[in-house]
Image: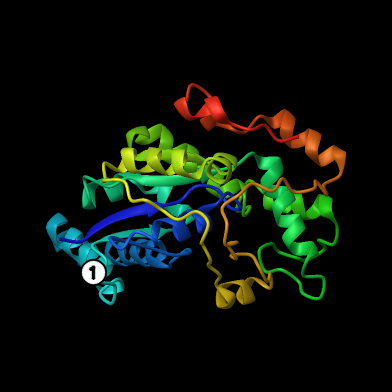
Amino acid sequence: MRQYYFISGLPRSGSTLLSAILKQNPEFYADISSSLEAITGNSIDTITGNETNFIISENQRKNLLYGIFEGYYRHIENPTIFDTCRNWTKKTNLLQALFPYTKILCPVRDIVSILNSFEIIASKNPFHTTTLVDTTDIDNVFARCHEMMNKRDGVVFEPWIFLQEGYALNPEMIHFIEYENLCKQPEKTMRGVYKFLEKPYYSHDFENLEYSNENFDRFCNLEGLHTVRRKVEYKPPRCILPPEIVQEYKKANMEFWRENNEMNQDIIEYK
């Protein structure tokens, strides 16, 4: 019987790298963000807003959502599927009701590093305007960073909120994976992932990874956004953010997952 697990967490924190590693296991299927979360959400909204809402049973609703998952991945033969979306952590109760065994892998990274990573990838695409932020009147690094941290729908702030929501509600479902740990100690980190999933460990080849998704990156106008290098290793990026931005978000201390968490012992602080 097919099983469904999920990858969520923060952007620019290694979810594509994690997927590339997981998919080496012939039992697993993983890829970049899918539209499945949006499809299930829209389906629930449609049923709830329909005049037949009160005659559709809970079992019918659950079966409908089962059908969406099965239909979406019918072409995949792997028995264990990891669906990726930043929004899944706001729906932990739904996932738990559908798949009581399920868990969510959440790659994370300090906020300054995330903002810096977005700036670096944007700087490598000077002839294109990214679609990741509303570019109206946004033509400088301060405006771009503040837009990504917009409390309404910022591309960094919104998944950070969802991550807090899911962890507060169902912490046993969520496993944080620090980007630096995944890059510096991939085997140790992945053994922790398998232990959390309660799956037998698969011996991954961390010297031979390759993954890219040109179509998705073309939509964002950011070539290389989802490109994974062959070898898993940590190459500290140069910080190209102004000191004022670095200090602002370091002082914000938004890395809540580092508090009282066993994985913290090997965390590398951003400098």
Which of the two residues, 47 or 33, is positioned nearer the viewer here? 33
Q: How many marks?
A: 1
| Residue 59 located left or right of residue 208 | left
> In the image, what residue occupies the spot 81% across and 76% down?
127
Q: Which residue is mark 1?
A: 70
Q: Residue at x 50, y 53 (%)?
A: 206
- Residue density around tag 1, few if under 14, some if 14–19, many if 20 or more, within 10 Å: some
- Residue 262 located left or right of residue 198: right
Image coordinates for residue 270, horizontal then vertical, percent: 71, 35
User: Residue 243 vs residue 115: left or right?
Assistant: right
Residue 116: % across, % down: 74, 49
199 relative to 9 in the view: left or right: left
The scheme the figure's colours follow is: rainbow
Q: Callout 1, which amino acid?
A: Glu
Residue shown at 53% from the left, 40% from the top: 185
Q: Is residue 239 above or below residue 19?
A: above
State the SS at label 1: helix
Image quarter of residue 227: bottom right
Position above or below: 94 against 56: above
Q: Nearer the viewer, residue 219 or 58?
A: 219
